[in-house]
Amino acid sequence: MKQKQRTLIEFERLYQNDKNIDKNDFGDIENFILKNSDENATFLKIGSGSGGKFIQARNYVGVLQTKSGLTIEILPKIANKVDKNDTDKIDGLKNVFLKMLKSLKDFPFKSSNLAGLKTQNLPLLEIFISMFLRELEILVKKGIKSDYITLENNLKFLKGKLNINEQIKRNTIHKERFYVEYSEFLSDIKINQIIKTTLKFLYKKSNSSKNQQKIREFLFIFDEVSTCSDYKNFFTNYVINRQVKHYEQTFLWCKIFLLGNCFTPHKGDDLALALLFDMNLLFESYVGNFIKKKHADIRLQHSKKHLVEEPRSFRLRPDIFLEGKFIADTKWKVIDQDDKEKEKNNISQADLYQLYAYGKKHECDRLYLIYPKIDSAEQGSMEFKYDDKMRLKILYFDLENDSKNDELIKNLLN
């Protein structure tokens, strides 16, 4: 059966009475939200209006899949209006999201080469699966690891070491048999079992004939490997060593798919899959790393100062810090950059207080708030004056075209 696919942009609504949404799917997503509705995990929002009950995307972007196969991809909002029929624009939003994912530390996106992947008109989930399969292809070319495995069997010939207790128990009558323990050099080791388990899991999730064909080819290669049912414990205890270093990226992908919540831990099993990313953290990571490449002395998440000195508490963590030069914080928020009055009103008072505290504690007069640039707006800036010396400047980062951020970098470093 062909799986259903829906694309949402951040803050867009999905209504319960939508004829393309099954009531069971809506109910499963609603239960997922209710179980994860605390202040630390506001993935989506339940609401109601003139159009009836709805589920609204928040500032979490990624993929959800219900048990019946409905896949919902949520894309970042970096445009005032997005025509869902404009495939080029939708692909552009996906590419921006994937580019930002590559800035995440200790995740497999960092090493993934998207250049060779034909991501056009491909759902996010299929892109993730394609990235995993590409890493697995590299692994297989380097060689699948095998190891000596201790086996027990009741054979017609003596091999290895005779297990006396089991021999007495099982073969008192069958004198022609030997219950033995022996070692064989096999590929059926735990880490290969994890890969095969992931392949079988993804075969049911994928709706791409190309990805399914590739998965079948890999399953043939791993034919002699069994699957693993206790993979949660395995991920908790397993450490990648030198012998399996070439497994590292594939291993991370397996963890992503099988655990399904390593980015944003969630409760319950109402959904088949939930890979969601906090755009606040993702924007912070991408912009911070982008600017750090321009100046090696820049520090990210600098945390040497506290808001309260006695008792020492409330550690301050500016996103981007350059000693004696400037402090900057990133905020994932759509600001109306075309209307200066709206722009000023949309700047959060809490953000202004936060930057003021950073400036005072670090004795720094140059402060910046960096927001995402919306596609229709002109690149510009706004300035706030705290006192005779301390200034806060609003800057906008262009996620669609990194080369257009030269003016922003110039503002920061000069």
Image: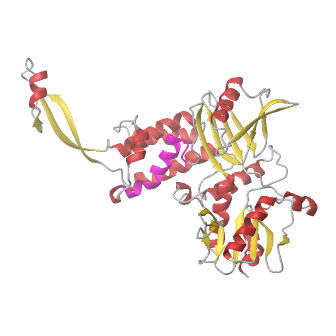
Which residues fall within the magenta stretch?
244-262
- The one of 376 and 12 positioned closer to us in this rendering: 12
**Which of the 4 quarters of the picture holds residue 276?**
top right
Residue 372 falls inside the magenta stretch: no
User: Who is closer to the viewer here, 42 or 287?
Assistant: 42
Looking at the image, residue 322 sits to the left or right of residue 197; the answer is right
- Kindly report the secondary structure that dominates the magenta region of the rendered protein: helix
- The residue drawn where x is 80% and y is 47% is 86
| Residue 364 shows up from this direction | yes
Q: Which of these two is toward me, 1 or 205?
A: 205
**From where the camera sits, is residue 398 visible?**
no
Q: Tell me the residue at 70%/76% (across/down).
A: 326
Quadrant position of residue 39? top right
Give how far across and how far down residue 207 sits, in percent.
60, 36
User: Where is residue 287 drawn, in percent x and y?
Assistant: 67, 65
Judging from the image, the colouring scheme is: secondary structure
